[in-house]
Amino acid sequence: MSQWHRLLFFALLGLIFAHAFITTVMRSSATAVPQFLLALSFLPDTGAYRDYEACGAKLDVSLDWHPPPKTQVNDLDKVLHSQGVYGFIFNSSDGPKNDYNFCNMPRANPETYRVPGERYTLEYVEVVSRHHKRTPYAANLLSEEEMGAWACDDEMMFYGAAPIRRGTASTYWTVYSTDFNPFSPNGTNVNCQFPQITSDGLFDSYRHGTDMRAVYVDLLEWYPETYEQYTMHYRVTNNHITSQVASRMILGSWREQESQQVAILVQPAQFDSLEPRYPCPAAKRLLDSYGPGSDSSQWQEHLTQSAALKQRLDSITGVDPKDNAWSDSWDHYFDNLAARTCHHKPLPCSKDDPSNCVTQEDADHVFRLGQYEYSYIYRDSPESLRASVASYGVYFAELVQNLRHMMETQDAADEPTTSSRMQWRVNIAHDGSIARILSILQVSQMVWPGMGAEVIFELYSKEPERAGGMKCYYLRVLWGGQVLRSSHPDFRYFDMIPVGTFLAYVDGLVGIKGEKIPGLCAGNL
């Protein structure tokens, strides 16, 4: 064997050992992955490697919690002594496009959407939206009689099933109650589920769908004129209200789908990552140690200082002051009162004295306290990032895999096949889903994600400036239709961030393919 043959043999042998080493390490705990290996993110289907640093990515990205700045939302003194709710809207689905509106949150729309420069090509979009306006949850009703104050006989909730390629009747629920059921409220005709998307919420869902189409089909001309099931997916949670929203949102975007069969994705309830519902006792223990129900002095402070308001509301509504569900946080009062004001229903009055009612000033105070609580739970507490990563890390692992898959299919061939090119995913979820996303992105100002609240992840590519250069990928994140501002020093303004920086951040927090999450959820955070 000649000297050159020997050199070639040992070089090939070295490459084989290097590949085996990298593969072994990548399959181990993400804490053991050195930063230089993250520079070569493995794309499993093609075996290709990408040098993200060449595209400006920062791979030694901070995995620490970075506190948000002090604002009127998380300044307890302002929360307790302000008037109104900082200009936030709680009584209408209409309002300025960029203003916080709990009844119908701002979102991407053709009037305020900022189109990137011509050098960037949009490759992939993933949307996560909260459902739209609904009745309160049953646990948040002030009394059984309140059920009768909600009318849902102006809508149909379709439920049914059919074997594949077989027909079925188009069945829908008609909710009713009778006097012969001893558990139904006496003299009250109940025709709603609690919760249920109201007809107003269904109308807002349709408008949300029209806005999505107006941006990504009409304005950008990025997606075709008609819905294609192989390039776009809708996903919901196991809570039926998200499916109610999906049906109207789909129609708003794709009128040709009226009365058609459209598949929407859902994971099994036992481990759904979108709501989320996968078991994570460690995250619950951590939240219980600093949030609702905890003895934490920081949590108890706002409850102590708002005790007089709580006592007044309990005396009017008849809520038991010892009921922990109504005393551990302002969540229940917030949900009940916001549902009323968003649907133009009167604030509650005392049964014994109808002239003694909850005032708008009382409601505004509750709304400020609710905003403060969400900010503390998901951003202000130093424990918030760890709790959110454990309880929502699986979704982020899925998200980065979607980004990687799109880049992989783009690089594998000049013309990806239709079946391999999933361009657009729309997820319909809940306020806790959106809040955890914002928590992990370390949003600068945390608020309670209202009805229809929306986060969008947009993946862009940019062709190399010189021949033989590398195509680079960038991520833009929109919150409420505008570029998200983060307290994280490596992101700040989430506008065209090198995607490698984001992948290094998520991989560092949740592990490659989410491998850290089972251990985090089973251990002590």
Image (spheres, rainbow, N blue to C red):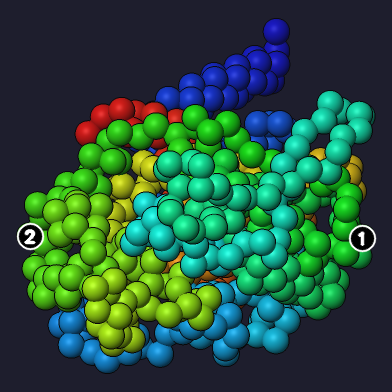
Residue at x-position 66% and y-position 67%:
199
Left or right: 129 in relation to 376? right
Q: Amino acid at mark 1?
A: Glu
Q: Which residue is mark 1?
A: 256
Which residue position holds label 2? 297
- Asked where in the image residue 361 lies, by quadrant, the reply is bottom left
Side of 306 where 517 appears, left or right: right
User: How far across and down, in percent of the image, does residue 509 sit?
Assistant: 39, 44
Look at the picture and state if 57 lies above or below 92: above
Instruction: Judge from the rendering whether residue 375 lies leftward or rightward of residue 393; answer left or right.
Output: left
Q: In the rendered picture of this protein, how many numbered marks are placed on residues? A: 2
- Point out the residue furthest to the top here: 1
Give the label, 2 or 1, closer to the camera.
1
Displayed quadrant of residue 355: bottom left
Q: Amino acid at mark 2?
A: Ser
- Going from the N terminus, do you reach mark 2 or mark 1 first? 1
